[in-house]
């Protein structure tokens, strides 16, 4: 049996059982330290999730039911995921940044039997509970207090994981909804486990590693928490990203994972130095493009080369750069073990190395499709089982993948393709540009017109648009040069710091019709 076959076999069960097989040999070791000073071992994780699962079962949660978590970050919030999975349910993380109407939409769509929320969100859930089929609402704050914590505390610390297969559902994770209403991607047990183990091994996690965890709670399960658990490592939780807190805690950590915005904020601090990073082993980036100048600046300041990776809600992470080996800006690495990744043209034929095409992925365990959306699920897969990611990219050196963006971001102007990332990289290198987004909006002559929306480092210094456009004309084909430049005080971003291009496209949809 190959190592990959062994992992695939381990993953063919309740995911909690698979994770427990990996962490229970280290049960006495620390699992997580909270920002309020509380610490929990892996033995605590095993005991408390049994008590939580028992409480969920008492309130009618059975295999296949949904358990929603609308929570602030805490050790208990993280453990709730493992408890729900242990009970055979599908965990449904809901971002605390969502508005009441957005929360109501997700709840109506998924129909969770039980919901656990931050105390200030209880009224919202109570108002929609009947319409959404929610039978019981608990509260849980960032310090572990609330009705949920009070009720599970006295329960039996033994709970046998409900029998499941690797194909059964593990979680429902909603897409960001950048092209319409969010879709609920049903992550399978097998995908959750195989991905966690593959990432832990790719990033060389061991039980002495300490992840400094500052990502939002709804985005903190896959790609960060599960690889830690699969390797018996530990975490230090921050309630949210704060550059000062991160710098102060780096001497106690070995790994940090964040989006490019986090690294930009760290570079703004004078106390972010090589000395502060001396104990660190690895800095991981992803979820949004990393600017080449920031990539280089980070390396020069910290002495570390950022490690990029690529993934989607539906597939989890599918590529990563190696820990040992050359890493470059714009390079998302190679497919993880077991992941088949291909880049194809409009006919489905493979493109040559260096040519741009659509990225498609196939894995030993796939996501189970979109919740309550069989037609969308059917449209998302090729007949041979490959998932159509909707992203475009190219193969570079030695099988590495460069991801250029979402297919929905592709701009077709006058029949010619413009890939926003190529234009954005050049604008971001211009003086006083903090960040930018290049989008396509309706144009009466060209179908779509290229628009660059810029955020400045210092608004008082302004932007020499004429000089910027002249430089771009010297570096890019004419059809790629923006037909309009817009300066905003601040670009709209989601909870992970990704620029919301859908918002920008909507707000600037009439830019060229107004100009005429």
Image: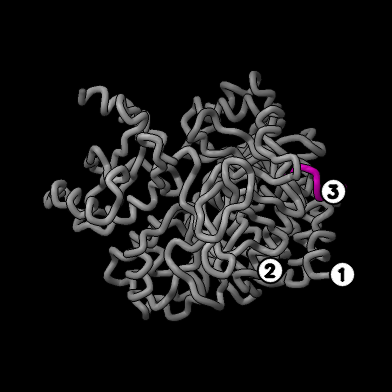
- Disc 2 versus disc 3: nearer the observer: 3
Location of mark 1 (residue): 1
Q: Secondary structure at mark 3?
A: loop
Residue 65 location, quadrant: top right
- Earlier residue among tags 2 and 1: 1
Total marks shown come to 3
Q: Is residue 8 above or below residue 485?
A: below
The residue positioned 50% from the left and 75% from the top of the image is: 326
Q: Which residue is mark 3?
A: 165
User: Between marks 2 and 3, how big is the CA–CA gap?
Assistant: 22 Å
- What kind of element bears circle 2? helix
Q: Quadrant of the C terminus?
A: top left
Q: Marks 1 and 3, Cα distance to the nearest angstrom?
A: 20 Å
Q: If the image is split into quadrants, where does the N terminus sit? A: bottom right
Closer to the camera: disc 2 or disc 1? 1
Secondary element type, mark 1: loop
- Front disc: 1 or 3: 1
- Using the image as rendered, state which of residue 216 and residue 178 is in the foreground: 178
Judged left or right of residue 405, residue 265 is left
Instruction: Please name the residue shown 28% across and 42% down the image.
Output: 452
Please name the residue that numbered disc 2 is placed on.
Answer: 231
CB under 8 Å between callouts 1 and 3?
A: no
Q: Position of residue 366 (x, y in %)?
A: 73, 47
Within 10 angstroms of label 1, few (less than 14), some, or many (20 or more) residues?
Answer: few
Part of the protein shown in magenta:
162-170
Q: Position of residue 189 (x, y in %)?
A: 76, 49
């Amino acid at each position: 049996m190959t190592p990959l076959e062994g992992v695939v076999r381990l993953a063919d069960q309740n995911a909690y059982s698979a994770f427990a097989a990996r962490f229970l040999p280290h049960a006495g070791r620390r699992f997580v330290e909270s920002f309020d000073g509380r610490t929990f071992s892996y033995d605590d994780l095993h005991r408390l999730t049994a008590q939580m699962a028992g409480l969920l079962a008492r309130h009618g949660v059975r295999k296949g039911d949904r358990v929603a978590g609308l929570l602030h970050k805490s050790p208990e919030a993280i453990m709730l995921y493992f408890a729900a999975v242990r009970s055979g349910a599908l965990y449904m993380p809901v971002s605390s940044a969502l508005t009441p109407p957005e929360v109501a939409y997700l709840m109506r769509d998924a129909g969770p039997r039980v919901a656990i929320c931050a105390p200030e969100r209880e009224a919202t859930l109570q108002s929609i509970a009947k319409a959404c089929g929610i039978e019981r609402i608990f509260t849980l704050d960032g310090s572990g207090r609330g009705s949920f914590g009070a009720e599970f505390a006295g329960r039996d610390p033994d709970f046998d994981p409900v029998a499941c297969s690797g194909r059964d559902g593990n979680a429902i994770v909603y897409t960001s909804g950048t092209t319409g209403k969010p879709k609920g991607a049903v992550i399978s047990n097998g995908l959750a486990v195989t991905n966690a183990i593959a990432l832990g091994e790719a990033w060389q996690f061991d039980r002495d590693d300490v992840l400094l965890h500052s990502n939002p709670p709804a985005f903190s399960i896959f790609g960060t928490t599960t690889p830690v658990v699969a390797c018996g490592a530990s975490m230090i939780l921050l309630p949210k990203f704060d550059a000062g807190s991160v710098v102060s805690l780096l001497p106690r950590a070995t790994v940090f994972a964040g989006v490019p915005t986090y690294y930009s904020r760290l570079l703004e601090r004078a106390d972010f130095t090589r000395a502060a990073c001396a104990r660190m082993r690895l800095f991981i980036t992803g979820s949004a493009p990393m600017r080449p100048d920031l990539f280089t600046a980070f390396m020069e300041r910290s002495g570390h080369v950022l490690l990029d990776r690529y993934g989607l809600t539906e597939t989890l992470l599918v590529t990563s750069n190696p820990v040992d080996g050359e890493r470059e800006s714009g390079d998302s690495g190679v497919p993880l073990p077991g992941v088949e990744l291909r880049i194809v043209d409009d006919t489905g034929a493979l493109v040559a190395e260096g040519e741009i095409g659509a990225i498609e992925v196939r894995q030993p365990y796939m996501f189970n499709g979109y919740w309550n959306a069989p037609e969308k699920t059917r449209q998302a897969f090729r007949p041979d089982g490959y998932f159509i990611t909707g992203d475009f990219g190219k193969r570079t050196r030695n099988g590495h993948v460069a991801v250029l963006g979402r297919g929905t971001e592709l701009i077709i102007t006058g029949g010619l393709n413009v890939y926003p990332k190529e234009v954005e990289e050049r604008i971001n290198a211009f003086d006083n540009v903090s960040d930018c987004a290049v989008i396509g909006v309706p144009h009466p002559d060209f179908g779509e017109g290229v628009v660059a929306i810029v955020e400045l480092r210092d608004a008082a210094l302004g932007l020499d648009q004429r000089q910027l456009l002249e430089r771009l004309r010297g570096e890019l084909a004419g059809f790629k040069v923006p037909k309009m430049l817009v300066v905003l005080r601040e670009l709209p971003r989601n909870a992970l710091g990704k620029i919301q291009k859908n918002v920008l496209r909507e707000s600037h949809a009439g830019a060229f019709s107004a100009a005429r």
